[in-house]
C-alpha cells in the first residue's frame, strides 16, 4: 500500500458538484471503502504495493462581516486511488479505510487548532494556511507511522491496535466533527 495525499487550500466555497465532478467521497462515519472505489490507473513504477489511496483535505476559509468560518472536508479521490484487484484482501481495504479515518481525525484536529489560534481579519487566511500546513505535515507523519507499525496491514495485531486507536480518536475529537466552524473575528 502506498498512500498519496493531496493538499488543497481553497479560497472559494466548494459546491457539491466539485466532489461529483472529481469523483470524491466525503468522509462519513458509516463509510466502508470497496474495491470499486479504486478507479485510478495503477502506478507503472510501483511493483511492491497492491493498493494506493488518495486522501486529502479541502480547507475553505471565509470572512463575512465580523464572522470567520472555515470549512474542512476530508475526502477520498476515487480517480487517483488504484488497486491491483486480485491482490487486495478485506484486511487491506480496512487498512486503507484507516488512512481515510486518520485524514478525518486530522481535519478535526485542525478545527480545534483554528479555534484556539489568535487571528484578525488582515491575517486570517495566512494564519489558517499555517495551521493547515502544520496539520498536513502531522497527518503525513501519522500515516507513515501507521504503515510502519502495521506493515501495510500484514501485522494483524498491530492493525487491530491501530483500528482501536483510530476509533478512540474519532470519538475524542467528535466535538469538531461539523464540517464548518464559525467564530467572531476583529480587524
Image (tube, rainbow, N blue to C red):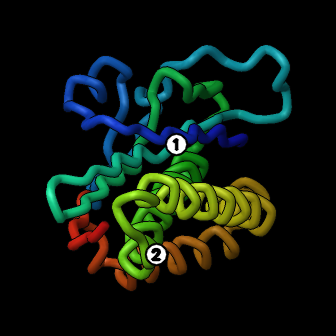
Which residue bears the numbered disc 2?
113
Q: Quadrant of the C terminus?
A: bottom left
- Cα distance, mark 1 to mark 2? 21 Å
**Left-right relation of 108 to 31:** right
Give the answer, above or below, for where 14 lies relative to 91.
above
| Quarter of the rendering containing residue 167 | bottom left
- Chain-order first, disc 1 or disc 2: 1
Q: Disc 2 on helix, strand or loop? A: helix
Give the answer, above or below, for where 26 lies relative to 63.
above
**Left-right relation of 166 to 62:** right
Name which residue lies at 50% across and 38% down.
8
Which residue bears the numbered disc 1?
55
Q: Position of residue 47 (x, y in %)?
A: 84, 26
Q: Position of residue 180 (x, y in %)?
A: 24, 59
Dot 1 crowding, Cα within 10 Å, few <14, some 14–19, many 20+: many
Q: Disc 1 on helix, strand or loop? A: strand
Name which residue lies at 55% across and 29% down.
81
State whether residue 94 appears in this view.
no
State whether residue 84 appears in this view.
yes
Give the answer, above or below, for where 161 lies relative to 3.
below
Amino acid at each position: 500500500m502506498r498512500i498519496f495525499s493531496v493538499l488543497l487550500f481553497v479560497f472559494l466555497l466548494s459546491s457539491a458538484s466539485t466532489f461529483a465532478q472529481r469523483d470524491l467521497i466525503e468522509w462519513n462515519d458509516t463509510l466502508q471503502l470497496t474495491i470499486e472505489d479504486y478507479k485510478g490507473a495503477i502506478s507503472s513504477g510501483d511493483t511492491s504495493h497492491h493498493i494506493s489511496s488518495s486522501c486529502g483535505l479541502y480547507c475553505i476559509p471565509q470572512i463575512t462581516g465580523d464572522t470567520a468560518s472555515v470549512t474542512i472536508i476530508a475526502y477520498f479521490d476515487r480517480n487517483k486511488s488504484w488497486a491491483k484487484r486480485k491482490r487486495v484482501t478485506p484486511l487491506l481495504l480496512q487498512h486503507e479505510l484507516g488512512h481515510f479515518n486518520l485524514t478525518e481525525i486530522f481535519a478535526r484536529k485542525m478545527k480545534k487548532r483554528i479555534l484556539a489560534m489568535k487571528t484578525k481579519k488582515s491575517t486570517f487566511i495566512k494564519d489558517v494556511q499555517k495551521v493547515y500546513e502544520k496539520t498536513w505535515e502531522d497527518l503525513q507523519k501519522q500515516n507513515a507511522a501507521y504503515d510502519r507499525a502495521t506493515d501495510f496491514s500484514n501485522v494483524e495485531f498491530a492493525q487491530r491496535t491501530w483500528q482501536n486507536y483510530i476509533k478512540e480518536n474519532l470519538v475524542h475529537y467528535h466535538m469538531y466533527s461539523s464540517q464548518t466552524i464559525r467564530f467572531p473575528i476583529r480587524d
